[in-house]
Amino acid sequence: MLIIGERINGMFRDIANAINTGDPTAVQEWAKKQEKNGAGWLDINTGPASDDPVKHMKWLVEVTQEVSDVPLALDSTNYDAIEAGLEICKQPALINSVPAEWPKMERVFEMAQKYNAGVIGLAMNEKGIPKDAESRVALAMELCACADGYGISMEDLYIDPLLLPVNVGQDHGPEVLETLRQIKTLSDPAPKTTIGLSNISQGTKKRELINRICAVMLIAAGLDTAVGDACDDELMEAIACARLIMNLDIYCDSFVEVYKNRW
């Protein structure tokens, strides 16, 4: 499983301050830390601190690319901001994200086609997040159909079955695991999968422990990527170990370092 580093996000106080002051120090420090610890992508999100998401998305992309060559996942519900970021990305990016709603899918997949970008598709629509795996898979099929219509490869489509915090949506957990298993049967090649890993532990105690155990279980169900804390060493070690047990990587004594350096 590849980790999409979550830390360059305006909901964090230091990144919000960087956006408001125009000081790139915190952004660039987190970009380098996450890259060093094995992040395969860096998620870029202006967050609620921004009063001009288009301007600030461009700035975050620019200052991040000054210090890191890791590909970027542009994270916003403002598609003008995402397109502004796509225009200056040095390599193909990942659009994060679009629900299974046709006007929004058309806008996002058109951008993906234009900029050779991947897309994270959310298993939700205007009615919200369904509870059962069957409904989530049906929405995943809609995302696959739209992507195919725009010539987007299934290998560039990442379906997110949407984890809810375990303290409020505990009964969704098994449904998410089953959704991941079923998504891999939708096509050949199958779409990839992703998840907002830290969502599972929002509002709970022992957040890091919950995230780590959840990551291992998700890998066993077929998860390909996750937006998470690339600087949590124990999380990265757990992922590396789970990949060994699932026969995704060949064992060597330095398997953790190999995992962190492979991306």
Image (cartoon, rainbow, N blue to C red):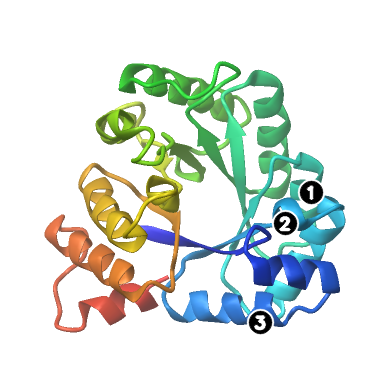
Q: Position of residue 250 (x, y in %)?
A: 17, 69
What amino acid is labelled 1 in the image? Ala
- Which image quadrant for residue 3? bottom left
Q: Which mark is residue 46?
A: 2
Q: Is residue 263 left or right of residue 74?
A: left
- Which image quadrant for residue 69? bottom right
Cα–Cα gap, marks 2 and 1? 9 Å
Could you tell me which quadrant the C terminus lies in? bottom left
Front of the two marks 3 and 2? 2
Residue 48 or 27: which is nearer the viewer?
Answer: 48
Does dot 1 land on a helix, a strand or a loop?
helix
- Say if 184 sits above or below 239 in the image: above
Q: Label 1: which residue?
A: 81
Residue in view at x 45 percent, y 26 percent: 140
Residue in view at x 41 percent, y 37 percent: 164
Q: Which mark is residue 67?
A: 3
What amino acid is labelled 2 in the image? Thr
Residue in view at x 69 percent, y 73 percent: 64
Res. 62 in view: no
Residue 160 or 175: which is nearer the viewer?
Answer: 175
Cα–Cα gap, marks 3 and 1? 21 Å
Residues at marks 2 and 1 touching, judged by CB atoms closer than 8 Å: yes
Q: Is residue 246 left or right of residue 78?
A: left
What amino acid is labelled 3 in the image? Val
- Looking at the rendered structure, the number of numbered marks drawn on it comes to 3
Does label 3 or label 2 sit earlier along the sequence? 2
Q: Position of residue 248 (x, y in %)?
A: 21, 59
Q: Is residue 186 left or right of residue 243?
A: right
Does label 3 or label 1 sit earlier along the sequence? 3
